[in-house]
Image: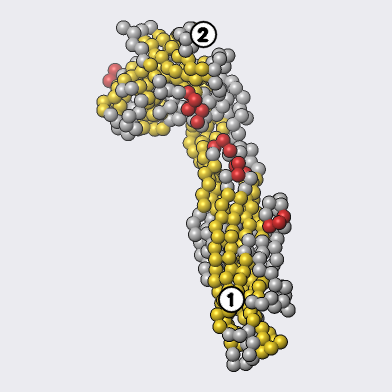
């Protein structure tokens, strides 16, 4: 009896999200994910060679943006000092101005990838590719006062008292510095953008020098120096925006502080000035998978079967007729037929009866409710050789014989098969007309291309003897 299974959920437009190299290896070879790693830029500052132990907050030689036209009226650097007085006193340096603006740049190496996707041609028998799977840019907060981070604060804060009633009298001046530190970047579609306003307060008191006179400089201390940003700002970079060819990207950090003064008591005029400090600190991390082309060495099994035994457990059974020099079986599981992870391991028999190895393994760690699960065996031989079995498929709580997954190339799909015999492939359009027919054979199936067909939904009928599966595929 022929059993027909309709799978409405296997919509191929979701599959290109699986990260696998785009080139197709030569027949008998396959891409194998060897592991994962990451690139980390370490902390990068607007001040070159900054370290976490640096105590100078923004007064070293800073890095200007490559283009300053976007902020601060097009000027990279504002005044080194800015000051304001109660009643417009300006007989000191600098002449009274209560606003300032500064731009600085963080320059980060995007990712020095030595193994680019696309550098391997179709039909290759060797090759290595590193594919990004995610990235983050983090704008860092100041960890402690006077340490670098995304923050601003005033340094070398000084004030003066002018005129008043003379010796024996004093005036207290309160100072407010308002900071608005922001950052932005045109990299990654401009998604790196943010900022935070912050206010620091201070005051100073001085003896009134009398009419026409002014005091010497009086230091005033600010509260919360450098603690502008209270938490890291993290930006997730979409995979399609992560460059693979290295290069740099720039984040512009800019601050627009203003200063104001009021008199708390006394009769003299007061002037407060500041040398503003502003710093930007960020890091960048790329997570990537490492893929290599390996020869498909089929593991010849007398039997390899799978059956669900509960909602979250599958039992595997296999028999190997030749156990000579075998060391260990790694059971690998996949939910998409492309990305594999170890589900467990079984030691090979040392002295199997009649040279026959019979094995059982129960996978109790599957995701409950998963409709399709792929399994394969990875045999490690004592010589160091690695051999893969064909795949078995669990679909809708039963063992299936065929499946279909995207290769990552537009409208191209790989037939995953639990058998190696010749299989008939029939492509049927939505009107029920047969538009393509051909055969595939060999362990692991083969690839089919639907590029020459009009856009739409097609039924892919895969058949061998009395075994038949029907899956859906999109052409776009």
Mark nearest the camera among 2 and 1 is: 1
Please name the residue shown 44% across and 10% down the image. Answer: 423
How far across and how far down the image is residue 168, in percent? 59, 93
Displayed quadrant of residue 377: top left
Q: Does dot 1 land on a helix, a strand or a loop?
A: strand
How far across and how far down the image is residue 249, in percent? 64, 46
Please name the residue shown 48% across and 36% down the image. Answer: 35
Q: Determine which of the numbered discs, if any, sits on residue 262 in the image.
A: 1
Please name the residue shown 69% across and 88% down the image. Answer: 211
Q: Does dot 2 land on a helix, a strand or a loop?
A: strand
Q: Quadrant of the N terminus?
A: top left
Q: Quadrant of the C terminus?
A: top right
Please name the residue shown 66% across and 89% down the image. Answer: 210
Q: Please indicate whether residue 17 sits to the left or right of residue 57 in the image.
A: left
How far across and how far down the image is residue 115, in percent? 60, 35
Is tag 2's residue or tag 1's residue first in the polypeptide sequence? 1
Q: Residues within 10 Å of mark 1 (few under 14, many from 20)?
A: some
Color theme of the render: secondary structure
Q: Please indicate whether residue 344 sits to the left or right of residue 132 in the image.
A: left
Relative to 183, residue 265 above or below: below
- Looking at the picture, tell me which residue is in the foreground, 420 or 215: 215
Relative to 62, residue 242 above or below: above
- Looking at the picture, tell me which residue is in the foreground, 259 or 291: 259
Whole-angstrom CA distance, mark 2 to mark 1, is 84 Å
Q: Provide the residue designation for mark 2.
A: 435
Q: Please indicate whether residue 276 sits to the left or right of residue 428 in the image.
A: right
């Amino acid at each position: 009896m022929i059993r027909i299974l309709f799978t409405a959920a296997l919509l191929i437009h979701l599959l290109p999200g699986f990260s696998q190299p785009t080139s197709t290896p030569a027949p008998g070879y396959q891409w194998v994910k060897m592991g994962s790693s990451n690139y980390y830029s370490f902390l990068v500052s607007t001040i070159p060679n900054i370290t976490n132990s640096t105590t100078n907050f923004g007064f070293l030689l800073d890095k200007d943006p490559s283009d300053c036209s976007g902020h601060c009226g097009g000027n990279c650097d504002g005044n080194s000092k800015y000051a304001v007085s109660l009643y417009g006193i300006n007989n000191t340096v600098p002449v009274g101005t209560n606003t300032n603006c500064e731009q600085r740049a963080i320059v980060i190496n995007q990712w020095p990838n030595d193994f680019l996707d696309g550098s391997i041609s179709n039909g290759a028998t060797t090759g290595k590719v590193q594919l990004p799977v995610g990235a983050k840019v983090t704008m860092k907060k100041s960890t402690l006062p006077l340490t670098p981070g995304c923050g601003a604060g005033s340094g070398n804060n000084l004030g003066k008292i002018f005129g008043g009633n003379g010796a024996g009298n004093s005036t207290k001046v309160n100072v407010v510095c308002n900071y608005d530190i922001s950052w932005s970047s045109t990299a990654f579609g401009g998604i790196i953008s943010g900022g935070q306003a912050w206010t620091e307060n201070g005051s100073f008191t001085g003896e009134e020098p009398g009419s026409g006179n002014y005091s010497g400089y009086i230091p005033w201390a600010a509260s919360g120096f450098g603690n502008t940003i209270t938490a890291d700002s993290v930006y997730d970079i979409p995979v399609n925006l992560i460059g693979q060819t290295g290069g740099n990207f720039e984040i512009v950090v800019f601050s627009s502080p203003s200063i104001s003064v009021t008199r708390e008591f006394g009769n003299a005029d007061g002037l407060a000035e500041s040398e503003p400090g502003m710093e930007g600190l960020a890091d960048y991390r790329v997570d990537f998978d490492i893929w290599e082309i390996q020869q498909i060495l089929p593991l010849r099994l007398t039997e390899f079967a799978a059956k669900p035994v509960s909602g979250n457990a599958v039992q595997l059974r296999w028999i190997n007729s030749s156990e000579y020099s075998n060391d260990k079986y790694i059971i690998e599981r996949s939910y998409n037929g492309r990305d594999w992870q170890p589900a467990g391991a079984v030691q090979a028999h040392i002295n199997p009866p009649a040279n026959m190895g019979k094995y059982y393994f129960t996978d109790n760690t599957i995701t409950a409710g998963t409709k399709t699960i792929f399994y394969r065996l990875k045999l490690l031989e004592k010589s160091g050789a690695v051999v893969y079995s064909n795949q078995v498929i669990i679909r809708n709580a039963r063992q299936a014989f065929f499946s279909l997954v995207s290769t990552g190339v537009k409208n191209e799909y790989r037939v995953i098969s639990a058998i190696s015999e010749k299989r008939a492939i029939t492509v049927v359009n939505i009107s029920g007309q047969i538009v393509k027919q051909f055969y595939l054979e060999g362990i692991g199936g083969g690839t089919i291309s639907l590029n020459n067909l009009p856009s739409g939904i097609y039924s892919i009928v895969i058949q061998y003897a009395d075994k038949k599966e029907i899956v859906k595929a999109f052409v776009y």
